[in-house]
Image: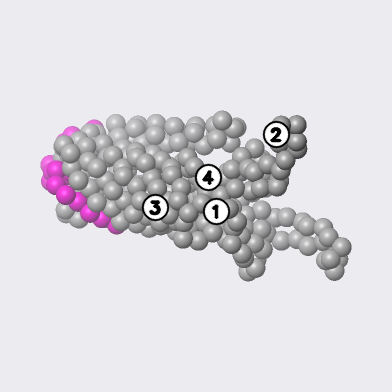
Amino acid sequence: MSMKQDVIVWRICLLVLLVSALMLACSVVSAQSTAKIFGQQFQFGFRGGISWAELELEGSPSSGIDSRRALTAGAFWAFPVSSRFAIQPEVTLKHYGNSVYVVLTSPDYPDGYAEGTFSRNLDYIAISSMVRFQPLSQGTVLPCLLAGPRVDFNILAEQGFEDDYYDIPSKKNVTVGVDLGGMVVLNLKIPVFIDIRGSLGLTDVYEVCGVGFQVEGGLVEPACLNVKGNMLSITAGVIFM
């Protein structure tokens, strides 16, 4: 595991710890509330917010590379298994990408060089199956933990300078990942919530070939580096029961 992956994992662990602490604090408030029972019937809802996503190039330093900030939105359904657990399928629009300021040299350029911001943008329709754990089913403030697998279907993959974009070669049409996080529900007449979530990519979104070398059978061959997508998102939404 690379140093960058270690940082991402520690960020996710810290997020889970913070959400757990928030759950404990909210439990004290909720224990004295008489709000309606939550989580014992079928639910559906919508959420939207902002995400910070990056593309992790295997073995490449992240210095000078900016992550992609974008809007995200989706819908979900919740099927209660018990008063504390529910299965929550979701459909979400996700955006991954990065950008870096580069300087290219070539005798073909008028001044011998060209400079600008090189960006990569990848958009996905993500389908996930989350397990939702809610220690309390009655109260005004209800914390929940969420975890589950995710499958992403690519709908856009482009890269380039300024407005001159072209398709990313070797992109993967389907990738797999996992989501971890939590949410706090305000159990009002129509419940609303805030959701904080980290998304880790488990499979490659595309490959970059010819940028390194590896030795195979005594021969030096161009190597391909794997690229994965990771994301942190904060969303808010409404739940209908």
Horizontal relation, residue 173 to residue 182: left or right: right
- The residue wearing badge 1 is 171
Secondary structure found at label 4: loop
- The residue wearing badge 4 is 204
Please count the marks in the image.
4
**Mark carried by residue 126:** 3
| Residue 60 in view (yes/no) | yes
Q: Which residues are magenta?
A: 28-46
Image quadrant where residue 72 sits: bottom left
- Compute the Cα span from label 1 to label 4: 8 Å
- Compute the Cα span from label 2 to label 3: 37 Å
Q: Quadrant of the N terminus?
A: top right
**Around disc 2, counting alpha carbons within 10 Å, would you say few (fewer than 14), some (14 to 19), or many (20 or more)?**
few
On the image, the x and y values in percent for residue 183 come to: 32, 43
The colour scheme used here is: one colour
In this view, the residue in front, 11 or 112, is: 112
**Around disc 1, counting alpha carbons within 10 Å, would you say few (fewer than 14), some (14 to 19), or many (20 or more)?**
some
Sequence-wise, which precedes: disc 2 or disc 3?
Answer: 3
- Compute the Cα span from label 2 to label 4: 22 Å
